[in-house]
Image (cartoon, rainbow, N blue to C red):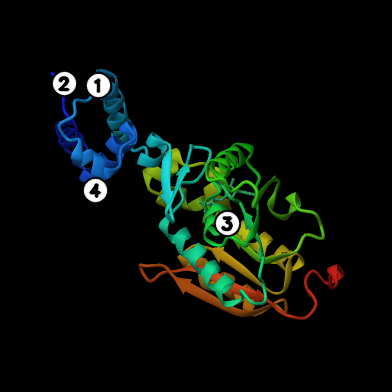
Amino acid sequence: MARDLDQALRHTASRLARSPSARAEAEELLSRLLGLTRLELTLERHRTLSAEDDRRLETWIERRLAGEPPQYITGRAAFRGLDLAVSRAVLIPRPETEGLVEAVLEVLRAEAGRWPAPRVLDLGTGSGAIALAIASEWPSARVTATDAATAALETARSNAERLSLMERVHLLEGEWFDALDADARFEVVVSNPPYVATSEWDLLPHEVRAFEPAPALFAGPTGLEALREIVDLAPRHLVAGGLLALELAEMRAHEVAAWLEGALDWENVSLRDDLTGRPRVLLARRQRGPAIAPAQWGEQ
Ligand SMILES: C[S@@+](CC[C@H](N)C(=O)[O-])C[C@H]1O[C@@H](n2cnc3c(N)ncnc32)[C@H](O)[C@@H]1O
């Protein structure tokens, strides 16, 4: 017998009962499946689910039971109020990355007089989450976003188009700074690079290991490889006083901060905690004199 939305919701929540957020996941799957808001789901609870939608819902429940994250099943992820398309080519944007964006926006607010139209570089943009959130929340920003993965950039491009942000977000393919002209300069360089060590594979939850793209997660044997490359090359592309903002792993945050504290290129190095009190964001300013490292670069 055909189910109404209320029955479908209860059925889905009971199939997903192993998850602590079964009811919320059931609402998310059903509302995405039908293109309804949560409120509409309630208001239309007596509406009958079509046979086709019922079949799709069962497939989605099976995928969820196999551990696939709801965002890959529905193809959608929320990030700072943006509704982003995601596929298995991109990392699912995380709440801690919303904190990274907030930290950048705080500096943009504080520097609005000095940087009326800040140039922002997002390295390893994935779905475009950071770049698009900054472009939408700071309308005078001109954002460049790079990624080494063609499929990730396609997702970022389709998100930028759907959000009508293509005019202010410039997407480039390539390894970290290689995608840029040598003389490209920014007021802000922001990145959530891969920062998991390959040896930590077993520590990741099944949902992450089995479904998220390895190049978005793993940096190399130490987990510090991508961060090192970005920290070493960022001075070359930041204006004097420019901001470097990085997401990193809590257990390596102090080690990375120590690199910058001991280097002449950087000042005002600080770590920011996430909502659970773990240091997950590093902020630093390029010192106001000439770029020091590598020595042969000289001043711009
Ligand atoms: C942790 S994900 C972050 C994605 C997105 N910025 C976010 O916060 O949700 C890291 C991203 O860096 C990209 N990446 C990995 N290695 C790279 C490299 N050598 N050069 C440029 N991008 C790279 C991956 O393709 C992936 O999209």
Residue 2 — which label? 2
The image shows residue 16 at horizontal and vertical percentages of: 22, 38
Is residue 288 shown above or below 134? below
Label pair 1/3, CB-CB below 8 angstroms:
no
Q: Amino acid at mark 1?
A: Ser
Marks 2 and 4 sit apart, C-alpha to C-alpha, by: 26 Å
- Of the image marks 4 and 3, the number of the one nearer the N terminus: 4
**Whether residue 183 is visible:** yes
Marks 4 and 3 sit apart, C-alpha to C-alpha, by: 32 Å
Secondary structure type for disc 4 = loop
Q: Please name the residue that numbered disc 4 is placed on.
A: 21
- Of the image marks 2 and 4, the number of the one nearer the N terminus: 2
Residue closer to the observer: 299 or 188: 188
- Of the image marks 3 and 2, the number of the one nearer the N terminus: 2
Label pair 1/2, CB-CB below 8 angstroms:
yes
Name which quarter of the figure residue 235 lies in. bottom right
- Of the image marks 1 and 3, the number of the one nearer the N terminus: 1
Secondary structure type for disc 1 = loop
- Of the image marks 4 and 1, the number of the one nearer the N terminus: 4
